[in-house]
Amino acid sequence: MHIGTAAMNLTLPFDSYPGRGRQRLGEMCNGNCRTTYGKIFIQKTGQHDCAYCGMDLWNHRDRWKFMTLDHIVPQCAFKDKEIYVLPEFCHDYTNSVLSCTVCNGFENQFWHSYRERLIGRRFDTWEKCWDLRDEIFRLKNGLVAVKNRQDCDEYRSQNPSGIVWVREADKEVLTLPEATVRICAACGQPTDGAAR
């Protein structure tokens, strides 16, 4: 896998975390994403949109119920005997992003192909863990964007009269007739009441 120029220049969601994502935020507690650890994550980071598709997951109840936290360095990496990742990093809030269930489900098998390049490496400091997190997010974000575009194209092929919500940044790369993309320039949400 090669990280392209666009992926390297990507603004990372961690940049808006306290300490620009380079400060420990504490271990996630047990419970439910919507009522405990997700709510705490939002309070700590100020994030409320899916880090992959940009959907607001906090201010709309119909979207709030699909809110998850995605471990960027996946939990299985901390059990891998061929790669060492600082155990405390696994459940620290800095190793996660807010994600909708759809984007969190895309590329769940990503780690299995990516881990090969990490065999024998040690991520034994917080700085090394944060660097690994950033690299993985850049790669996974690009893969999820491709999946989202394919998903939109598939939806349009099955439902030509349906309305598709699209991030402003992805408009030009989707094969959608302009008339079907109805986005409010101010808030980025669909303007048709039926699409809410």
Image: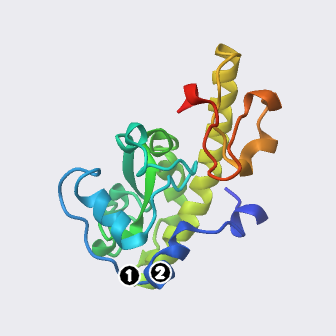
Compared to 111, does 10 lie above or below? below
What residue sits 44% from the left and 49% below the top?
A: 57
Nearest the camera: 11 or 92?
11
Nearest the camera: 65 or 192?
192
Answer with the quarter of the image where residue 46 lies.
bottom left
Amino acid type of disc 1? Asp
Answer with the quarter of the image where residue 75 lies.
bottom left
Q: Position of residue 30 (x, y in %)?
A: 17, 58
Q: Seen in the image, is 42 located left or right of residue 142?
A: left
Is residue 156 visible in the rendered structure shown here? Answer: yes
Local packing at callout 2 (Cα closer than 10 Å; few below 14, some 14-19, many 20+) is: some
Local packing at callout 1 (Cα closer than 10 Å; few below 14, some 14-19, many 20+) is: few
Compared to 165, does 155 lie above or below? above
Q: Seen in the image, is 34 located left or right of residue 191?
A: left
Q: Secondary structure at mark 1?
A: loop
Q: Which mark is residue 128?
A: 2
Nearest the camera: 15 or 49?
49
What residue sits 67% from the left and 56% below the top?
A: 1
Compared to 192, does 110 lie above or below? below
Amino acid type of disc 2? Lys
Give the residue pinned by disc 1: 124
Asked if the residue at tag 2 contacts the one at tag 1, i.e. Cβ–Cβ closer than 8 Å, the answer is: yes
Between the C-alphas of marks 1 and 2, the distance is: 7 Å
Q: Secondary structure at mark 2?
A: helix
Q: Position of residue 134 (x, y in %)?
A: 55, 70
Q: Position of residue 96 (x, y in %)?
A: 41, 63
Q: Position of residue 141 (x, y in %)?
A: 60, 54
